[in-house]
Amino acid sequence: MIRKDTTAGIAFVILALLFNPILSLEKKNFKNEDLIQRVTKIHPLEQNLSAKKNFTRSTTGNNDSLLVLLIDFQEDDDPKTTGNGKFDLSDGSDYPISIGRPPHNRQYFHYQIEAVRYYWRAASLGFYDLKHDVYPKRDIAAYTLPHEMSYYNPENASQELMISRFEEYFRDAFTVADSTSPEIIFSKYRH
């Protein structure tokens, strides 16, 4: 049996051994010259990525154009879907966080796509500049589809029905956008 004072002594010796190297360190005064002489490590690919001559800019016309269609649905109160089928156009002043704050209007989505554009410009060292248009251009919220949201994604749908409804969703979206905004030239956009 180990006595209490022996246990305390052993603990003290262990702590002393552990902290001795830390306690015996000398204070080192670094000069600015010491810090400046440090070698900056460079990733092996940085030189290649920084050399813009290795990249070619896309010159294929409008292939880098994105068409953004704001689509909403017939208004509903279906508890199985989020929201009511419409964009949240409230003022957002009481929204708890800044990310995703309403109103979710045309300007909101324009800024979202601008963020994507800036990301791709930075990631490509300025060689990819995404062009985009957000429709509708007018101050209406969105193109409203002929059905409620749940119609396009029915609960417990078979694979065939799900594919059919997805196809119908896209067909309805383009049909409504085309009939409401005939100025859209769909062939102008690749994405």
Image (tube, helix red, strand yellow):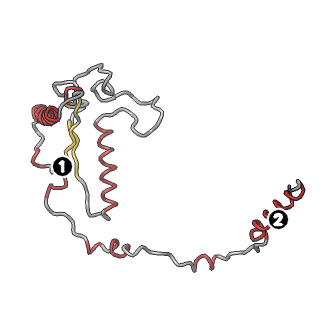
Q: Quadrant of the N terminus?
A: bottom right
Q: Position of residue 39 (x, y in %)?
A: 53, 78
Q: What type is the residue that disc 1 sits on?
A: His
Q: Position of residue 58 (x, y in %)?
A: 19, 63
Location of residue 24 by image quarter: bottom right
Q: What type is the residue that disc 2 sits on?
A: Val
Q: Residues within 10 Å of mark 1 (few under 14, many from 20)?
A: few
Location of residue 185 by image quarter: top left
- Residue 85 located left or right of residue 40: left
Location of residue 152 by image quarter: top left
Element type where label 2 sits in the image:
helix
Q: Residue at x 32, y 65 (%)?
A: 125
Q: Residue at x 89, y 55 (%)?
A: 3
The residue labelled by disc 1 is: 191
CB atoms of marks 2 and 1 within 8 Å = no
Q: Residues within 10 Å of mark 2 (few under 14, many from 20)?
A: few
The residue labelled by disc 2 is: 13
> Taking the image as drawn, is residue 93 in sight?
yes
Q: How far apart are the alpha carbons under marks 2 and 1?
A: 70 Å
Residue 149 against residue 40 in the figure, above or below: above
Q: Residue at x 75, y 72 (%)?
A: 25
Q: Position of residue 69 (x, y in %)?
A: 20, 38
102 and 83: which is toward the camera: 83
- Residue 159 located left or right of residue 32: left
**Earlier along the polypeptide chain: callout 2 or callout 1?**
2
- Residue 70 located left or right of residue 182: right
Residue 179, disc:
none
Q: How many marks?
A: 2
